[in-house]
Amino acid sequence: MESYFFLVLMLIVIWFLDRNFAMIKGWIGEKRVSNILSSLDPQDYTLMNDLYLPKENGQTTQIDHLLISPKGIFVIETKNYKGWITGSEHSQYWTQTNYKRKDKLYNPIWQNSGHIKALQSILGDAASEIPIHSVIVFGKEATLKFKEPFKNAYVIKSSNVLQTINTIQTSQEVSLFKRGKVKQLLTPFIITDIKQKREIKKKHVSDLKSELEQKKTLVAENTCPRCGSPLVSRTGKKGKFKGCSSFPKCRFIA
């Protein structure tokens, strides 16, 4: 009887770990990056983790790490993937390759762009003259295989986080007063109540799934999910693909 109970318990544990593996792995990656960022001088850098900001459409967007500094605001998205990561700044999906297996991931630069838009909406005039830096951080098990440089984001590995922040130069430092104002405006979005946070996370996951389905539907209907213009068939080095008809103003690639 005991052996039967133990077997059932093990099966439950295996099922739980399999179902929540991606979530656990993502949490580990975020914790690792958070620890790295925590080593920065707290007199100059204010770190906020796991912020849930409201969007104009009533949904929420989640920022893994937000760093307020004299160099501006760093909006950091963590991706704890392994294998080769390929893609471009303007493609809707990137590819994760492990041996012969290939999986798609939604373009994290676009994802972070949504975070920044929600952030700017909340901060309003308080952030009008503050530089906002988009940073995508992959874990140590990822191999970044990008053919073209990125213009609107820093796409790096966790080992290069501090080096990237230190090398960024700005024409004018953000004053202590402005940094304090940004912190004051964002503090209410740090959720400490466990039950409330669980409910917000559940809604956030549901919102993400709904948003991705809407984008897939638009692409299937030959409509650009970024600007609403028609998608047209184009031919590139790798063959035919769908691209936005408003190119080069909009560089969406399906």
Image: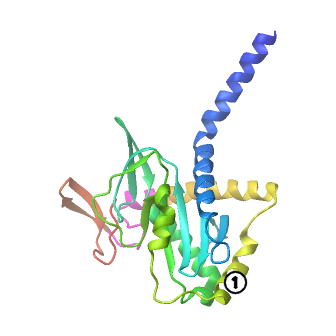
Q: Is the image coloured rainbow, by chain, by secondary structure, or in one colour?
A: rainbow
124 sits left or right of 88 in the view: right
Q: Is residue 219 magenta?
A: yes
Q: Position of residue 178 (x, y in %)?
A: 64, 88
Q: Nearer the viewer, residue 204 or 210?
A: 204
Q: Residue furthest top?
A: 1
Quadrant of the frame with the N terminus = top right
Amino acid residing under circle 1: Gly
**Residue lying at 45% horizontally and 88% vertically, measured from the top left:** 171
154 sits left or right of 24 in the view: left
Q: Nearer the viewer, residue 59 or 25?
A: 25
53 sits left or right of 226 in the view: right
Which region is colored magenta? 216-230
Number of numbered markers: 1
User: Callout 1 environment at 10 Å: few (<14), some (14 to 19), or many (20+)?
Assistant: few
In the image, is residue 84 above or below residue 249?
above
Residue 30 placement: quadrant: bottom right
Quadrant of the frame with the C terminus = bottom left
**Magenta: main secondary structure:** loop
Residue to which mark 1 is pinned:
180
Q: Position of residue 39 (x, y in %)?
A: 62, 63
Q: Nearer the viewer, residue 176 or 53?
A: 176
Q: Position of residue 37 (x, y in %)?
A: 60, 63
Q: Is residue 103 magenta?
A: no
Q: Secondary structure at mark 1?
A: helix
**Residue lying at 62% horizontally and 37% vertically, measured from the top left:** 19
Is residue 111 something that shows in the picture? Answer: no
Is residue 214 something that shows in the picture? Answer: yes
In the image, is residue 215 above or below residue 249?
above
**Residue lying at 63% horizontally and 40% vertically, measured from the top left:** 20
Q: Position of residue 89 (x, y in %)?
A: 36, 65
Q: Nearer the viewer, residue 93 or 77?
A: 77
